[in-house]
Amino acid sequence: GVTDVVISPGSRNTPLTLAADRRAALHCHVQIDERCAAFYALGIASAQHRPVALVCTSGSAPGNWYPAVIEADKGGTPLILLSADRPWELQNNGANQSIDQIKLFGDSVRGFHALPPAEAARQGRHQLMQLAEQAVHQSLWPDPGPVHINVPLREPLTPEEPLPEPAVFSALPAQPRMPQLCADEQQLLAIANRISGQPGVVVCGSGIDSAAFRREVTALAKICGVPIFADPLSGLRFGEHDLTHVAAEYDTRLQDPNLAADQQPRWVLRFGAMPVSKQLQQFLQQSSAVQHILVDPTGRWPDPLHHTSEMVRATPESFCRLLQQHPLKQAPAEWLGAFVVSDSRRADSGKEAPLEQKVVQDLIGGLPDDSILFSGNSLPIRYLDRYSGKHGKRLQIVANRGASGIDGNISTLLGMAAASKKQGVTVAALIGDLTLYHDMNGLLAAKDLSAVIVVLNNHGGGIFKQLPQSQLPQFDRYWRTDTEIDLQKVAALYELKFFRVEQGADFPGVLQKALHHEGVVMIEVMMNA
């Protein structure tokens, strides 16, 4: 199940490091900073859709994994955390680099396993193999996320004689088959009867992106004659699937109070996490719909609006496929047109587009097919939500929206670049200047990788200008927090190619230069602060 291991240097984890290094089938990555290492592993796991192992020494080292563990937990990304530890005789007595690592990550992991000392573990090789298989399955199903295995190791930590050939065990399949949860037939029939012929909306957030789901949910929307409110992370805005029923401009259109008040759905069908758009959240919150159906295979109940009237434990694609097998009538003909804007109606308003809109649209237009676009949190993901539109181009937009932090974004991006290197996939990012500052250490991993990092420099916490804090006299000191860092010098420190864009019209040309450059390229776009 595991093909990649991210290792941070340390003494206590030497046996784990050597064991990973001796397995030809494993791709070992070395990341010095444990926090960066964990987000780097998160990026690989997100790109490959399989668990990635992390290895580090004892003490505060695994504690530095915690921000990425939180993101993996909330975002549903599989990780196997292998923390080296002091043996029991060096616990709770002041021994150096020793902390209590038992259940260090609390409820943020899908499972915790404490191994016995190595000499005892040698007597249970088959139990260890079973544990390895169990950990992989726990990380993948039913609720993907991290699994922690704590490994106590005594000195000597290096081999005193030549190591024997690694024991041969039957390997797990590269992609273990996980069960598919299907809705109950009676439940499906009841739902079909309630929504048939009624105006409704399908709402799709992050965490559900698959070709099968795109095919089935668009087919279901077509049968019902309803719009799909597709978050940019849903995977539904871009691709060769049917885009006829995909609504991408809802964040702007729902600002019209008349539209929001007059077009009230009778039912809401939700898949994935709650979308980014605050306008959409308010629309759903104020909706008079009686039926709020949430389809989620994990049972996590992702509904911060507390509107769910029925929870369906099923995989989204199977639910959509099976629901289509029941008689369903279309909603009134005018319902779809209220939300889905055709190309002919997507006209220029006459106003000059803001710089962020130009950058988003030029970035999406300039990336080649099959690219991965990583979005930072705060303003970039909201710009993508509002301005990206929908397109037949094959483009995957991803972000760390589990906990929506601005830490570790560079490392996540470069992990994705490492995972995509052999396939020749273009990887790009749209982030803010504070997000870059939070993870500058991550740029050390840029060597031998290729990516384009577009930094929207609004000189600090620009998103706070949209919040009530902007009216406070202490705003600049406590919320805007302009670092005044020269990003050209940051790029030079890590030997990155650098471009600075002062005028929006220059961005498309600079982007093409960056895309044709080997290595990691940073493009700083100067925004109106």
Image: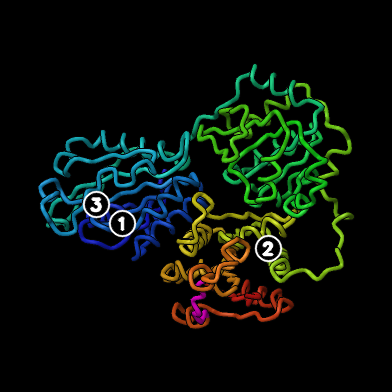
Q: Residue at x 66, y 42 (%)?
A: 204
Q: Earlier in the sequence, mark 2 or mark 1?
A: 1
Q: Is residue 170 above or below residue 392?
A: above
- The mark total stands at 3
- The tag earlier along the polypeptide, 3 or 2, is 3
137, 227: nearer the viewer: 227
The residue carrying mark 1 is 21
- The type of residue carrying mark 3 is Ala
Sequence order check, earlier mark of 3 and 1: 1
> Can you give x and y, in whole percent of width and height, for residue 312 in the image?
59, 27
Mark 1: amino acid: Asp
For the residues labelled 3 and 1, the Cα–Cα distance comes to 16 Å
Q: 357 left or right of 351?
A: left
As drawn, the residue found furthest toward the top would be 186
Q: Amino acid at mark 2?
A: Pro
**Image coords of residue 6 (percent x, y):** 37, 57
> Which quarter of the picture shows residue 394?
bottom right
Kindly indicate whether the residue at mark 1 contacts the one at mark 2 (C-beta within 8 angstroms).
no
Bounds of the magenta segment: 481-487
The reply, left or right, for residue 379 in relation to residue 223 is left
The local secondary structure at tag 3 comes to: strand
The picture quadrant where one finds residue 473 is bottom right
The CA distance from mark 3 to mark 2 is: 42 Å
Residue 377 drawn at (x, y percent)? 56, 59
Cα–Cα gap, marks 2 and 1: 35 Å
* 327 magenta-colored: no
Give me the disc on residue 84.
3
x 49%, y 44%: residue = 76
Horizontal side of residue 497 vs 505, given as left or right: left
Q: Which residue is mark 2?
A: 368
